[in-house]
Image: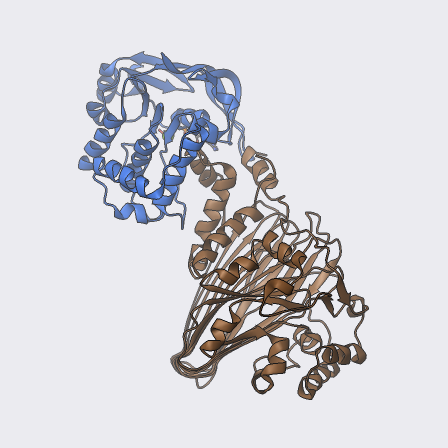
Chain colours: A brown, B blue
Amino acid sequence: MSNTQNNLEKLQNQKYKYGFTSDIETESFPKGLSEDVIRKISSIKNEPKFMTDFRLKAYKQFLDMEAPTWANVDFPKIDMQEIIYYSAPKTKISKDSLDEVDPEILKTYSKLGIPIEEQMRLEGIAVDAIFDSVSVANTHKKALAEIGIIFCSISEAIQEHPELVKKYIGTVIPSSDNYFATLNSAVFSDGTFVYIPPNTKCPLELSTNFRINTEGSGQFERTLIICDENSYVSYLEGCTAPAFDTNQLHAANVELIVMKNAEIKYSTVQNWYAGDENGKGGIYNFVTKRAICQGDNSKVSWTQVETGSAITWKYPSCILKGDNSIGEFYSVALTNNLQQADTGTKMIHLGKNTKSTIVSKGISAGRSDNTYRGLVKIGPNAANARNYTQCDSMLIGSKCSANTTPYIEVSNNTANIEHEASTSKISEDQLFYLNQRGISTEDAISTIISGFCKDVFKELPGEFAAEANQLMALKLENSVG
Amino acid sequence: MSIIEIKNLEAVIDTEESNTQILKGLNLTINAGEVHAIMGPNGSGKSTLSKVLAGHPDYRITKGEVIFQGKNLLDLDPDERANSGLFLAFQYPVEIPGVNNLNFLRMAYNSKMKFNNQEEMDPLDFDDFIEEKLNILKMKPEFLERNLNEGFSGGEKKKNEILQLLTLNPSLAILDETDSGLDIDALRVVSEGINAYRNKNNAVLLITHYQRLLDYVEPDYVHVLSGGKIIKTGDKTLALELEKEGYAIV
Ligand SMILES: Nc1ncnc2c1ncn2[C@@H]1O[C@H](COP(=O)(O)OP(=O)(O)OP(=O)(O)O)[C@@H](O)[C@H]1O
Ligand SMILES: [Mg+2]
């Protein structure tokens, strides 16, 4: 075996930087799922009846459902009775001032590179921080409220804006949608709510940071974003978790609703704990994300950088209902060691002249499995619909695999669909070329990878593109040298 | 003062497909201020020599040593060799999709600075620095915004190699068939670039098949490499003779 091959293998054994646990007193429910647990979650949150009913309906549906098996991921059956469904820091939670937030929590976030205190002062980004099951801090809320923007935790929205929540929750992802989404509908603990009123361009990047801290707890967050007519919002979500030996379940639901002439840009940088190099531990990330372009000329754009989790199962989708609406999906999924990712998108064209773009970049290293799975569906009324799909895979080393599974269903013959796919390897000659110019193998790999991901990274909001580059470098970092 | 001393060097290809000896006892010393040309039949081992010196992982040294500016070259990793001042302009420069040429040049430059404990150059100063080099090679600034060698024509790739030579200013420049694929004007411009790089403290090893480059960049020595060894050494007239008579004369 050549030196470069050796180097590549060394590079694949990086350590997870966010694997620490914070010593914070939490209040957790005992393990297990039952109608009683759901009623308790609802009552601890003092929810109105419609919410309790929503949860219970989902729970009943869940009881008749089986975990899906069609994805190219392999894991032991998850025992839903072994999960803690609610865990919250004991200290009092304040949304408006950080003075009352447990300093340990602030410390945790600042270790994660998200100094919330700083963000309070910083222009440009408003942050909501979700710790285990609840929102612990939300910055810039007041300033946003002045122009009619609601940015708060979903629990709070249920209290203060029940009419909006009631009107929209479950309209994009029905409670019976799929096993994990249904579970989420029954037990979701917290998440983020955003409402952008008509004719408003949200002046800040909105951002939520999710953190799972308690061992054995599941995280079931629910995000609901509504962007009303002629409005715009850009939203970024980031995720981390401590390194535990046991697997933890993360089953989130994200619903986006885009009205006429409006646009939502939703970006994710997912770096949940991926397990160790032998595949022990790590997050099972089973997420349902769906957007509906409700009005004409609306646009939704999903950008995701998926680097963590033991298993990633997620297909951010767009229902293009309004005429001339646009759906975009830009994805980088990196898997290393024994990670498995089955991810992609669904573009459902219903309106006329709807357009979708899919750019997926999969990078597999170690013994990992990386699958792109995408559906492009053109409905009978979607005259002149267009789709462009590009799926590129890059393999690092020889023990990993990459798969591309596109599904195309066309019921209108004016549709125009283009699909391109490629698989490449970082060649020894590319590495040698960069080495010969004085660039270390580590830097050479991250340079080549960021070149490969460029079309996706350029879609991320400004400063996060640099962050994504660093994250990729970190995930493939050499522990020596 | 010698820049490089290659002593009795033997090397084999060490890949899954092949295990053949290519270099079979090669000796060569190059002093500061000198230009050496290596000529030789196709497949004689010229590119192999250049890659072995640069540390390509496909080759294994079975015998001999190489002293590069007092250091044992073979102990160094490829990037350390580069940062210590050894530069190879590739016969076939590779394409690196999506990697911005300018960022790459700055990264390479700053890697060397860092390695030598010198201050790295900030992007603005680097823009001025690189513009001057571009002018020497009559290259358009657009090249900086393109991706590294991606979609470059054969000749453009070769020019881009010389741009890197001027940027990194090494003590030894090994140029593997840089003249192949260049049009008449480009050959002159590239030669001017090589001459602009030359000074009394550095050295050039030109690998070429043709006399025409040597008209512009005059060699002090011409060597014939054949069967993994240098079988003949002469002055610049040897190249003229070879051009006329072919390798049959050696
Ligand atoms: N990685 C490799 N795998 C297999 N064979 C190789 C490899 N590298 C070099 N060779 C072989 O070694 C011999 C020398 O090749 P090399 O590229 O050094 O020749 P060269 O003198 O540069 O030729 P040219 O003038 O055509 O460029 C050739 O027979 C070539 O096929
Ligand atoms: Mg050659």
What residue sits 63% from the left and 82% below the top?
Answer: A159
Position of A309 with respect to A302 (left or right) is right
Q: Is residue A375 visible?
A: no
- A437 to B222, vertically: above or below: below
Viewer-proximal residue, B39 or A126?
A: A126
Q: Residue furthest left?
A: B185
- A317 to B62, vertically: above or below: below
In the rendering, at what x and y percent does residue A333 appear? 55, 58
Image quarter (top left, top right, bottom left or bottom right) of the N terminus of chain A: top right
In the rendering, at what x and y percent does residue B108 appear? 40, 37
Viewer-proximal residue, B141 or A413?
A: B141
What residue sits 36% from the left and 23% below the top?
Answer: B172
Q: Quadrant of residue A212?
A: bottom right
What residue sits 47% from the left and 21% below the top?
Answer: B73
In the rendering, at what x and y percent does residue B194 appear? 26, 28
- A372 to A12, vertically: above or below: below
Viewer-proximal residue, A25 or A66?
A: A25
Position of A193 with respect to A83 (left or right) is left
Image quarter (top left, top right, bottom left or bottom right) of the C terminus of chain A: top right
Q: Quadrant of residue A179?
A: bottom right
Q: Is residue B5 visible?
A: yes
In the rendering, at what x and y percent does residue A172 appear? 56, 80
Report the number of discs: 0
Q: Residue furthest front?
A: A99
Q: Quadrant of ligand 2?
A: top left
Position of B202 with respect to A17 (left or right) is left
